[in-house]
Every structure is written in structure tokens, then in C-alpha cells.
Image (spheres, grey):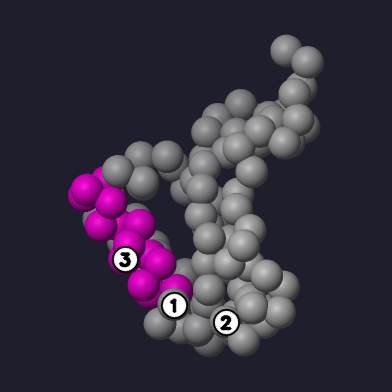
């Protein structure tokens, strides 16, 4: 996961430089428990340090109608001043928005 930390640094540097209004970062579910959760806390701290308010959770794209069946972790962020305006703190990553009929 050392490469994951390095990749995270690269992403955060790019976000700090280009400042997109909103972001979505996708990763493997093991990120949630890696290093007793320190990796997730580190990602959230780094994103907060460059101005983003974030939520995170796991979901499977197939539950959203996408032809991919693998659980993923999603970080969704909005620049902090705008995050309050869109109510990001009250949102969550949905677990299963609908059934695919399978």
C-alpha cells in the first residue's frame, strides 16, 4: 500500500493545484481497514488540508446499473465553502440504490 500513499499524494497535489469544485476518488475496499484505518484518516486529512469536505463509503457499481461487479470505496468531496451549500455533510454513499433483478 506504499504505492497507494504515493498515488494519494499525487492526487492531492493535483487537486490543490487545479481546485475542481467536486471530486470522486475510487479505491479498493481493503483501504478501509488497511493500517487499522489510518490510510482512510490520512486521505481525509490530506483532502481537508487542501480545502475539501468529503464523505466516503463502499458500493458495488453493478447496483447502479453498471456492468462491473466489484465492491469499491468512494470518496466524494466538494470544496469546503460550497460543501455546506450543497449539504454534503448530510449525504452518504448509497449502499444499494436499486436491485438489478439478479
Q: Nearer the viewer, residue 66 or 10?
A: 66
Spatial CA distance of label 2 from label 3 is 18 Å
Judge whether residue 23 can be spotted in this image. Answer: no
Question: As rendered, which of 21 and 86 lies closer to the eye?
Answer: 86
Tell me if 80 is positioned left or right of 42 in this view.
right
Mark carried by residue 4 = none
Q: How far is mark 3 from mark 1, CA to CA? A: 10 Å
Q: Can you give x and y, in whole percent of width and height, for residue 91 in the image?
A: 63, 58
Q: Residue furthest left?
A: 35
Residue pointed to by mark 3:
42
Q: Nearer the N terminus, badge 1 or badge 2? A: 1
Q: Residues within 10 Å of mark 1 (few under 14, many from 20)?
A: some
Pick whichever of labels 2 and 3 is earlier in the sequence: 3
Mark nearest the camera among 2 and 3 is: 2
Q: Is residue 6 magenta?
A: no
Residue under numbered circle 2 = 80
Badge 3 or badge 1: first in the primary sequence: 3
The span from disc 1 to disc 2 (Cα, nearest Å) is 8 Å
Q: Which residues are magenta?
A: 34-47
Residue 102 percent location from the top left of the image: 73, 13
Q: Residue 65 at what x, y percent from top left? A: 77, 32
Q: Residue at left 38%, top 74%?
A: 46
Q: Classify residue 98 as left or right of residue 84.
A: right
User: Residue at label 1?
Assistant: 48
Examine the residues drawn in magenta and state their main secondary structure.
Answer: helix
Residue at image coords 50%, 83%: 51
Q: Are marks 1 and 2 in contact (CB under 8 Å)?
A: yes
Amino acid at each position: 500500500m506504499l504505492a497507494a500513499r504515493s498515488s494519494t499524494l499525487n492526487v492531492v497535489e493535483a487537486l490543490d493545484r487545479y481546485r475542481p469544485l467536486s471530486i470522486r476518488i475510487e479505491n479498493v475496499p481493503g483501504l478501509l481497514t488497511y493500517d487499522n484505518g489510518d490510510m482512510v484518516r490520512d486521505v481525509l486529512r490530506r483532502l481537508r488540508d487542501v480545502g475539501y469536505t468529503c464523505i466516503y463509503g463502499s458500493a458495488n457499481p453493478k447496483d447502479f446499473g453498471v456492468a462491473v461487479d466489484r465492491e469499491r470505496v468512494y470518496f466524494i468531496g466538494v470544496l469546503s465553502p460550497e460543501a455546506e451549500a450543497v449539504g454534503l455533510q448530510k449525504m452518504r454513499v448509497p449502499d444499494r440504490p436499486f436491485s438489478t433483478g439478479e
